[in-house]
Image: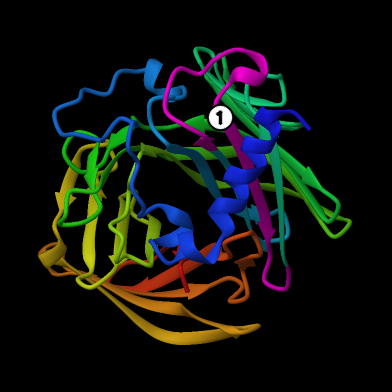
Amino acid sequence: MTLDRRRALAALLLLASPKVRAEGYAGLGDKAEGFEPALPGRKLVFPQDHGAHPGFRIEWWYLTANLTGEDGARYGAQWTLFRIALQPGAEGQGWADRNVYMGHAAATSASDHVFASTLARGGVGQAGVSAAPFEAFIDDWSFSQSDGLWRIEAKAPDFAYRLNLLADGPLVLHGDQGFSRKSDQGQASYYYSQPFFRVVEGVITLRGREAKVTGRAWMDHEWASQPMSPDQKGWDWFALHLADGHKLMLFRYRGATNHLAGTWIEPDGATRALSSDEIALTPLEDTAIGDRKLPTRWRATVKSLGLDLETTPLNPRALNGSRNPYWEGPISFRGSHEGEGYLEMTGY
């Protein structure tokens, strides 16, 4: 085993260690000397910012899809690529590249939730991201764009999916023009989304049963060096498609003082940033999964917008059994508005 391979393995084991988990979920609250900080005032530029940002310690490209089969059955699909920098500095070539990539994928139905993960080293053709044309890949999992059509694919022993997507609206910048605060102590990320993806056609296979699907999808891209404060143990994140065409993103970072924020998105892509004092996220019902108890039904309110929603999971047992387990699954909601979306919960 070469020195660089040992460093890659050591970094991945560090992310899973109890010491690091005590400093924020998956080590995201520990110090990041030598890496670039997320600061206000940076203008996001596209397509360049679709690509990787090697000066930052952690980065992810995330897509969640709410899908419906021809028979009306509901499904969910998740595709995630994480880039983790082993140390500060330029990317390097070949095994001198300083990045490790980790892929997560999952497929969900009302009765099943199946998760898979994979690891690869950057710089040697196993994983990477390019901005124009956009392509993110790890092994044979890929997310790419060509001639206006986006394609995403993943496969594992118990599931597979291939989805073709069109973007029916603009990119959305969260927070202050893409600068997203995660705590009152200064931790932050750069964060934008494409919440207007329409799944025009696709196929999902779950435990040997294949279904043709269409639906809606939400893509997030986020990068940072220290996105959590040391006292924060995890987050609760909602990406919601309202039936009337609006979109809503809400998150809560749990710590000594909870930090909440969100974005209200009009059907034409115009946005309004939501502050902590406008939002309330209240767990309604827990689900026990192994030795963990997670809140899988929620009430979400935004008084300034007249929003009062109660969410229900498609499958309350949608726990992703990674090195740092987290819950990720499709939800529906009703109340002042109806719709569907995705919920992610970490650090429980």
**Does the magenta-highlighted stretch encompass residue 88?**
yes
Left or right side of 312 for 29: left
Q: Which residues are magenta?
A: 83-112
**Extreme residue toward the front, this view:** 3
Q: Position of residue 51 (x, y in %)?
A: 46, 22
Residue 200 vs 285, above or below: the answer is above
Between residues 59 and 88, which one lies in front from this camera angle? 88
What residue is shown at x 25% (from left), y 53% (from top)?
182
Between residues 275 and 51, which one lies in front from this camera angle? 51
Residue 332 in sight from this viewpoint: yes
Residue 341 in sight from this viewpoint: no
Residue at the disc numbered 1: 99
Dividing the picture into quarters, in which one does residue 53 lie? top left
What residue is shown at x 61% (from left), y 69% (from top)?
318
Left or right side of 256 for 55: right
**Extreme residue toward the right, this view:** 208
What residue is shown at x 54% (from left), y 62% (from top)?
330
| Amino acid bearing label 1 | Asn
Residue 81 vs 286, above or below: the answer is above
Left or right side of 250 for 18: right
